[in-house]
Image: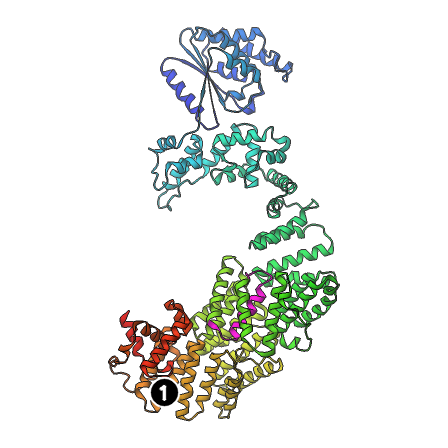
Amino acid sequence: MVTVSGPVGSGKTALLRAFARRAVEAGFVHLSAKASRTERGAAMGIMGQIFGGARLPDDTTDKVVRLLDDAALTAMLRDRDDESADRVDVQVRRGLGGALLELAEPAPLLISVDDAHFADAESMQCLLYLIRRIESARVLIVLTGTAGMRPPWPRLVAELLSQPNCRQLRLNLLSPEGVASLLADRIDFGDAEPEFWHRLSGGSPLLLNALVEDHLAVSGAPDGPPCPVGVAGEAFTQAVQTCLYRGDESMLPVVRALAVLGEPASPALLSELLGDACPSAAGGLEAATETGIVDAGLFRHPRTAAAVLDAMSTHDRIELHDRVAHVLYRNGAAAVTVARHALAARRTEAPWSVPVLREAADQAMEQDDTGMALDCLRLAERSRVDVGERAAIHAALLRAKWRLDPMSAERYARELMPVAHAGRLRSDLALMLVKHLMWFGRPAEAADLLDRITDVAAAEGPDSALAVSCVRARFGYFYPGAAKDAGTEALPRASTLTGVTGKLRVRTANIVEAVQRGGVTEEAVADAQAILQQYRLDDHTWESIIICLETLVLAECLDWAADWCDGLLQEAEDRRVPTWRALLSALRATISLRQGNLPEAERYAHAALSLIRPKGLGVFIGGPISVLLLAATRRGQFDEALRLLAMPVPDAMFQTPFGLYYLRARGRFQLARGSHKAAIEDFEACGELMVRWELDLPGLAPWRTDLAEARRGLDIAARHLAAEQLAKIGLYNRRTKGISLRELAATAELKQRAVLLRDAVEELQAGGDQLELVEALGELGEAQQALGEYAKARITTRRAQQLATRYELEDLVSARAAPGDEEAEPAQDPVIEELSDAERRVAALAAQGHTNQQIARKLFITVSTVEQHLTRVYRKLRINRRSDLPFSLVAGLRNTA
């Protein structure tokens, strides 16, 4: 007798078939049987299969049939749980054994039983009787069985293996070299080494052949895509299920549990999870590992888990997920981990379910998995909870929904309003609701709710009271008119606070108050940059970050604002938060517009309107619409401008700075179309609001120069407006200063006009607005031409045209050709030859309109070095300002490159 053992799928059956085929070719008579788990209780089932293939005389056949029936009937009457009892009478065993020995007389006899560990005990007693009496008879018995599996008759196994004529053979899974040998003639490895196939299959011939079959099925498809190496399909799924249903009884529940868990688990956790459903979790895990399905508690192939779950009923999956959730909760697993299984089970009956789901939602939001957070909160919403708990759930849903689409969050805001008015909403949640009301243009309701919260927050403690004060400051920032008379409580110094959130709130509120009180100061700009450097985007910081970016825009520190905004936009995109992206895109559009980059401004503004529904932007919609309206006006696309003006905007937007942007953009459109009176009305309305709000900042909206230009179109004296705007400019706003100087130059006498325009060019170059710079250069060229300075006019005009080409502004700049412009490029100025290579590079970039900071970044040098180079260039060329730099510097740089 030979016993062949090994893991499921190791090739035992294939080996047995190959051996039997050779034995028959050598003259053996082969009688076979295949045991099955489902037929294990059928007494004498294996012996019936063996004799079913035997060619016996008729009288012997009748005798064998009678003996098999008698043995089966006797087994039914005996205690099947008593392993020590003989299940088959001696006469039956003698009769059946004698019949088999008679078959071996004319020719050698091979008896094979595949999957013998599933054989019935009665048949195994008969085979054991035969094995003891083989002696010199020409009989070979081969039994195959899965290693590690315990048959229900261990005493019989012990007797079988103790026979002197018994030999044991062990089959192991294939090594990487064995895998390579098996695959050598079947597939082209390509870039995948045999170790890769071995890692996926664990060396199991069954799983490996299935993977090869799936690979060939896909790669052999005509005109199909390239086949990914290690693809798993129907054959692999079937092979996995074969392993599970033919292996150890403990393996199936263990593998199912691993598939549902989605992560490695210890035998102790598996035992707790499976309970009575699994005799031995450790044995099942070991069997799954030996089979090649699992390695270190993880499935070797990612398709395995799907194959296991596909074979489970929906009810079984739900029940197992529910048990997993309970066990993981008892073992202190992370809330997100527990919640995933609670979501799969869709049950919230346990008392811990809702708190865990809420905690998991918070964790998911921190990990930017907003979809997971919403799933948890929706399931929690279905449970029976009190009013306060339900309000907290709705507040969390409001926060999560706002990230994806603020419009979809409106439902939860409506649910929270009655609770907040009844004073049953925590102050932090009520403040979040206030911010939502501010967003959607409901300042009266926001102010009323703020007043209601004040007393509640004071009772909750100083932190809550501080939060209310900071939100009041932000309310004053977004709605300066509505909050003007309300006043704000004195805020503590940020340095005296210990909490991170409290420090940020106070620092932001101080920036807002400083800007409202005295305009953009150096300290406000420094504080804004410090906050941008220290804080990451999240649900608590986004408002502060937006305010800091807008502070830099108000100061017209456009390069800094663009750099910060680009980094934050990338972060918002990486973290998949559309509302943050829309907000930052709208702000980036404003920055690009003020830098004179119309194509970039339009691209960002369109992005802001497409990332979320335009109505979902609330009062913030004024930003991107104003940018697109100004760009369309500049391009002369009046039909597009009218379409933008037809878009609905909230009435409350005109109580915010976004309304100022909108009024100014509409006024610029009216002015470009020749409707000077309508333009004057919009510019005056803009100015009246800014004065009434005590927010008359040049960087917010240069309404005075706009109004002066409109009045000039009607021959109304307005030079004093540009002078007033110049007087209000402090340390920053060099861009607005340049715009104001241009307006002053428009009504100045010729010589003074050229001086003012040179000053305007200098300021606009420093301010970074390329569009305004191009127009100022064009006007300067015209003034120089009128003064008879033809060489300077030619250089200035060419510089304007070159900048217009770089920033795609050719259609916005009329051809201001100076006399002699058609002539060949003048010869190189000998004085320029005296400049060093470094000085030429710096001077050429300065002539193109780059600021010192931009030049420093491009050439990887410090701003101080740029200033030193320019000082030497001015001295060598005997000029006083950037606008006097000759155009030949740019051409020389191009020729050198």
Is residue 70 shown above or below 191? above
Residue 686 picture quarter:
bottom right
Q: Is residue 890 magenta?
A: no
Residue 342 picture quarter:
top right
Q: How is the image coloured?
A: rainbow
Residue 446 at what x, y percent from top left? Answer: 67, 69
Q: In the rendered structure, which amino acid carries the disc numbered 1?
A: Glu
Let me know if residue 123 appears in the view.
Answer: no
Q: Nearer the viewer, residue 258 or 59?
A: 258
Which residue is the site of mark 1? 782
Please provide the residue range marked out in magenta: 535-558
Split into 4 quadrants, where in the image is the C terminus? Answer: bottom left
Residue 84 at what x, y percent from top left? Answer: 61, 13
Q: Is residue 569 left or right of residue 218?
A: right
Let me know if residue 839 appears in the view.
Answer: yes
Residue 5 at what x, y percent from top left? Answer: 47, 22
Residue 67 picture quarter:
top right
